[in-house]
Amino acid sequence: MFQSARIKLTLWYLIIIMLISLSFSAVIYNSVMMELDRFESVQRYRIERQLAFIKQIPYSLREQFPPPSTSDLDLIEGTRKRFTVYLILINTGIAAMTGVLGYFLAGKTLQPIQRMVDEQMRFIGDASHELRTPLTALKTSLEVNLRDTQMSVKSARQVLADALHDVDRLQSLSDQLLELAQYERPVGTFHMEQIDVTTVLTNAVRTVSPLADAKTISIHTHFLDAVVYGNAESLTHLFIILLENAVKYSHEKSNIHIESTKQNNRIIVTVRDHGIGMDTKDLPHIFDRFYRADGARTHNAESGYGLGLSIAKQIIDTHNARVDIQSTKGKGTSISIHFIQ
């Protein structure tokens, strides 16, 4: 599809450039030809006057006056032909260069669109796969239990509880997909202002604290007074995601550290845990949609759909920030977000 579109776009480039080139060539050709015609007329008039003068001279004296030269007329005719050939060669060269460069530029123009479409198709495929699993489980469970004519009230309640659990997971997935779509919108759709970093981080820690308390995990904080330009709600959501992941993949009775530091004109916020960590091979993919590292899959069968860090990456990109990740399997993970102040 994109190859066909690339060829069509190249042809449009070629047509537009050649129309411009041929238009300029026609103007130049007409101008030059008019000058040559004028020069030729002058030369012919000069020759005719010389011939008329010679005719007035007595015949015996005419040998002393050679006939006028017509070499200038031959030169003018040759110039016409050469100029026409030059214009044809120049436009042929322009057509060839336009074809090559147009094909290259068409590829560059369509490349972001192709990436977006490929990403969208992959996203649809992954989302369909993730939706299919809980839907299939829910449908199978209901069908099997509907055939049970002797089901007790207790069993029916358990079936409904399991079904409600699957519905909650589906709702969670749909909510995360909507969040991801929201953060993929242009930056101008968010209200950006000067945000106090300490307030954002404090709110995020307060939100995640009950999850940490349930696993007897201590969250240690060290914040400095700093301001960044961004959206307060989005940034709070970003650090909630990072802290929730840190809690989820940390061992009980362990520690999580979150701190903000200043380096030159940058504010750096670091979330560091001492949990299960990640393999080096997983690091380039952790922000991919629906990607979950092997350790995350085995750590908790219902650890999530792998969309949290994708949403976090969109928030980071929206704020023109940079993320650095260091992780060692079995020792923990450190994620640092660099904001330009």
Image (cartoon, grey):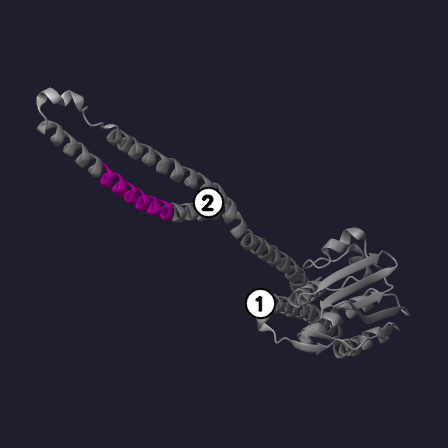
Image check: 86 left or right of 286?
A: left
Q: As shown in the figure, which amino acid type bears the numbered disc 1?
A: Pro
- Residue 258 among magenta residues: no
Label disc, if present, on residue 273 of the rendered structure = none
Image check: 322 left or right of 271?
A: left
Q: Residue furthest right?
A: 253
Location of residue 224 (image quadrant) = bottom right
Q: As shown in the figure, which amino acid type bears the numbered disc 2?
A: Ile
The residue at which mark 1 appears reads as: 186
Front-most of residues 111 and 152: 111
Q: Residue at x 70, y 77 (%)?
A: 195
Q: Residue at x 81, y 58 (%)?
A: 326
Mark 1 is surrounded, within 10 Å at the Cα level, by few (under 14), some (14 to 19) or many (20 or more) other residues, namely few
Is the residue 163 above or below the residue 26 in the image? below
- Residue 39 among magenta residues: yes
Q: Residue at x 9, y 29 (%)?
A: 56
Q: Give the secondary structure at mark 1.
A: loop
Front-most of residues 147 and 245: 245
Q: CA distance from mark 2 to mark 1?
A: 30 Å
Q: Give the secondary structure at mark 2.
A: helix
Q: Residue at x 45, y 46 (%)?
A: 10
Mark 2 is surrounded, within 10 Å at the Cα level, by few (under 14), some (14 to 19) or many (20 or more) other residues, namely some
The residue at which mark 2 appears reads as: 7
- Tell me which segment is drawn in magenta: 19-40
Front-most of residues 320 and 151: 320
Front-most of residues 104 and 36: 36
